[in-house]
Image (tube, rainbow, N blue to C red):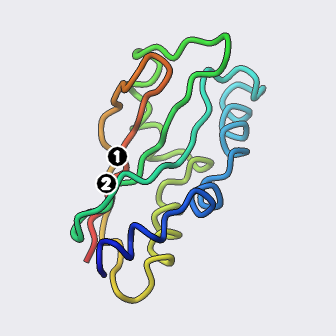
Amino acid sequence: MDTAKIDAIFTRDTLSTLFPKERTDDFFDALFGDASEGAYDIELAYGGNNGEQLVMELHLHERPGCCLACNLTQGLPQVFSRHPIINVSGLVNDIDELLGDATSCKEWSLGFTEQRSKALHVIPINITLE
C-alpha cells in the first residue's frame, strides 16, 4: 500500500476510535481500583510509516497535579504488551483491518519509553507490514 494512503487512514478521529479516552480510566481503575489515582492519560498517535514498518505511539500525558516520572514509565512497555485493557494485540488487529487487503500487519513490538518532555512520555508500537 502507498505510504500516503496509509498516512491518510490515521486521522485524529480514527485514532480516538481505535483507542478511546475512557481506556485510560479503565486501566487505572483495574490497576488501582480508582481511575483518579493514575498519573497520566494515554492517547494513541500516528508516528508514520515507510511502507515496510508502521509506527503508532502511545502518548502518556501527565495529569494536572501529578508527576510523570521516568521510573514510573520505563517498565510500561512490558506491562502494556500484556495488559488486557490496553490490548495492544487487539489494537494491531484493528489497524490491520483498517489497512484492508493491500497490506497487513505481520508482527508488532513495543519500543522503549521515550521522554519527549517532562509532561509527555511516548511508547512506540512498531508494526512490521507485509
* Secondary structure type for disc 2: strand
User: Which residue does the numbered mark 2 point to in the structure image?
Assistant: 126
**On the picture, is 8 further left or further right than 83?**
left
User: Mark on residue 110?
Assistant: 1
Give the quarter of the figure containing the N terminus: bottom left
Give the quarter of the figure containing the C terminus: bottom left
Question: What residue is shown at x 49% (from left), y 38% (from top)?
Answer: 59
Question: What residue is shown at x 52% (from left), y 61% (from top)?
Answer: 91
Q: Amino acid at mark 1?
A: Leu
Q: Amino acid at mark 2?
A: Asn
What separation in Å lies between label 1 and label 2 (alpha carbons)?
Answer: 6 Å
* Residue 82 higher or lower than 122, as above or below: below
* Residue 103 higher or lower than 40, as above or below: below
Q: Position of residue 94 (x, y in %)?
A: 53, 69
**On the picture, is 86 further left or further right than 80?**
right
- Crowd rating for badge 2 (residues with CA inside 10 Å; few <14, some 14–19, many 20+): some
* Residue 50 higher or lower than 84, as above or below: below
Q: Position of residue 20 (x, y in %)?
A: 67, 52
Question: What residue is shown at x 35% (from left), y 72% (from top)?
Answer: 105
* Residue 99 higher or lower than 11, as above or below: below
User: Mark on residue 90?
Assistant: none
